[in-house]
Image (cartoon, coloured by chain):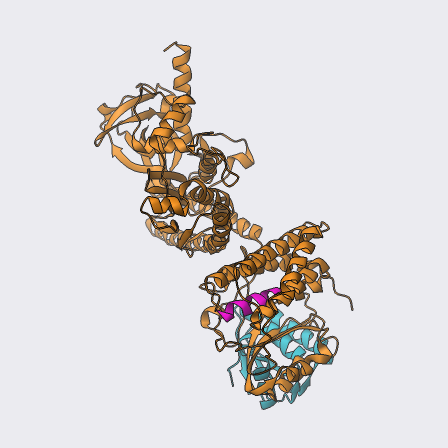
Chain colours: A cyan, B orange
Amino acid sequence: MQYFLLDDVINIGKLTTLKNALQQLIEQQQAVTIDASKVERIDTAALQLLALFVQTLKNNNIHVTWQQPSEPFITMVNLLALHSLLDIHHG
Amino acid sequence: MSLNLDQFKASFFQEGFTNLDRMEQLVIRLEDDPGNSASIQAIFRVCHSLKGSAGTFGFTEVTTFAHALETLLDEVRQGNRRINDELITQLLLSTDVMRNLLQSLEAGEVPNTIESESVIAALGQMSRTDDSCNAKNDVADAWHIDFYPHNDFLQTGNDPALLLRELGRLGQLQLTLQVSEIPAWEGINPELSWLAWTIELQGKSIKKEAITEIFEWVDTECDLEVVNANPSESHSPIDLHEGEVNLANGDATATTSATSTAAKKQRMMRVNAEKIDLLLDYSGEINIAKDMLNTLFLDLKLNKVIPPHELRRFEDRLDMLHESSRGLQNEVMSVRMQPMTLMFDQFPRIVRDLSRKVKKRVNLKISGATTVIDKDMIDLLMDPLVQLIRNALDHGLEIPEVRKSRGKPEEGLLRIAAYQEHGFVHFEIEDDGNGLSKRKLLEKATRMGLINPDAPLNDRAIDHLIFAQGLSTADELTQISGRGVGMDIVKDRIEEIGGFIDIKSKEGKGTTFHIRLPMSMSLLEGQVVNIAKQTYIIPLIAMLESVALEGGQYHHNRPLISEYQWRNEKIKILNLRKAFHLSQLLGSSPRPVLLIVDGKEYGPMGIIVDDLLEQKSIIVKSLQRNFIDIPWVSGSAILGNGEVTLILDCANVIRNAFKSLQLHNEGAGI
């Protein structure tokens, strides 16, 4: 099981760093726990990339677990109707 | 940063054609139910979406046309224009124009805009008339909003979340995520937007202007559509098909919806059909290797080369391989299977256009659209089925006055049905019209020298004369279905894909065509037989019955064609050894079997084989593609012992035999 902690602020300016980190997780071919407890601000671009990451792992039958997603994180997911793509409980 | 859009063009065209098909079906539906506001909303959305995506690729001919159409559609959905025959005809014509434009653009040609400009003028003319009512829908309690950000939306510094948050201040939002295709992770540019939404906004007296204001500063970076969700009190969702999967032509399309049903949540992706073919080839090779291993296993078992416990281990592993390879083959085949919806959805438009041309009224009944068949078969079936429909409308059904005088309803029945039975796919095309005149068929066939007037034919054989080249009982040549052109081609096409066509007709009552097809051209259920120590495969679809013969009932030196009493009828039987010039020195088989097969125009025919071996699913290898076309062979297959075996086309084997007998008789002056 791999563990990945999301930064407190993630936006389009940090996408390259985020993508590289997620790429490494994909290459490990192991289940991933994403800790979203520290997220204070996240934009659509970052959530879109996370959604693609989750879908890519799902296509490879690799399980993704969300750990304590913060309220701002869940609010954004709700606002953008991204639950099913992120495989996250509809809060 | 510049984006190369070429890679997305194939998807655009595919989706464009699919959307136009859908639009056509919606228009037909609107004609049947003009009060259905959801239909007109859906047509508008399809048109708008096509305009937006065509604009992305710079296809101005399409955007210009779609814009003109959209203007007219907007009047309709606002209740300012009546839905009548003229409008429906114009909308259907518009789908044709846009389809032609897309076809030209896809082929890399400059579209001929003469047609589109003339239709645009007609649409404009319509827009200038019939605008007596002028509904105001600028304030409403419920709005439907389509929000489709362009690919570069995020790169321009915009964030959909901010807009949606603003929108939420106007009322209660219900969002549905619209994702036509989830991109691949590899090579993704994370800054490109691929998310889109449809939004239901509900509140009290929400101004349209308030909504458009929110999106005003991104109007060039997205496609936005704001529609009164309740212009005439009802707003029900359109459900054209059992699922959304089938709308794409041949490929599955992903649709992810946050609020949709479980069926819509199925994960899907586009797959190139050639890759599926390749998978099927590999799956076939695995099956052959598995069969070879099985043969080896049986040899080892028989010769007691391996100790029993090792033999059991071998057998266990073989069973596992058997299960896996069968599962793989089934799954690959199922991917190739498509519902008839793709084809059947086109029939209402065809029937509408043709029935108007021939001035007939038609009650079209379609059933079995969800029956699945190999996608390649759908492509090959379309032309023959359309020809049968044309014939039914042109020659089969009578004009209303004639029907009335015959005591029939003025509206003629045309029934198109598909269903699966005994592992085969069946089609029926039935009309309650004129039916065939057996007298006329016999007269014409005799005149053309197709039959011997002294040799009586049964009803089935007479009806089958309609499939003879150049023969028709139609009194007049028409533009719709021609005269005597087509039915022979229909039969040839059906037979080329391994099928059978039958006809039953009763003069004055109507005609039914029955087509029987294998579910796939790649996979065949076959009977392996032995003839003079040679192995052949006979497709099960051709076999009607097998009869075990006593050795004495059959002698291998009997004539090429002789007679046999089968149940209550005397049928012809064919000596395959003679037909194939196989050795006559091997002596008769101790347990010959008579296979009764469908001899098409010759009716049931017997084929004598020396022995029946196994029945199995066979991956068909094309001989035509790899060697040459042999008329009496429909393909080849590799058996478990590695032997390459020919698959017989029974109807052509029989035709060849009769032909060579005729030549022989003529040579001998018989």
Q: In this view, does A46 lie to the left or right of B444?
A: right
Residue B293: x %, y % from top left: 42, 45
Q: Which of B311 and B459 is in front in this view?
A: B459
Q: Nearer the viewer, residue B364 or B99?
A: B364
Residue B272: x %, y % from top left: 58, 54
Is residue B560 visible to us here? yes
Which residue is most to the top? B669
With respect to residue B124, does B474 lie above or below?
Answer: above
Magenta region, main secondary structure: helix
With respect to residue B646, does B248 lie above or below?
Answer: below
For the point 38% across and 18% down, the residue is: B661
Q: Which of B106 and B38 is in front in this view?
A: B38
User: Which region is colored magenta?
Assistant: B36-47
Residue B434: x %, y % from top left: 37, 40
Q: How many marks?
A: 0
Q: Check the picture and name the quadrant holding the C terminus of chain B.
A: top left
Q: Quadrant of residue B271?
A: bottom right
With respect to residue B652, does B410 lie above or below?
Answer: below
Q: Nearer the viewer, residue B370 or B661?
A: B370
Q: Is residue B229 rendered magenta in the image?
A: no
For the point 31% across and 21% down, the residue is: B455
Q: Check the picture and name the quadrant holding the N terminus of chain B.
A: bottom right
Residue A69: x %, y % from top left: 57, 86
For the point 77% across and 66% down, the residue is: B2
Is residue B617 visible to us here? no
For the point 63% across and 79% down, the residue is: A47
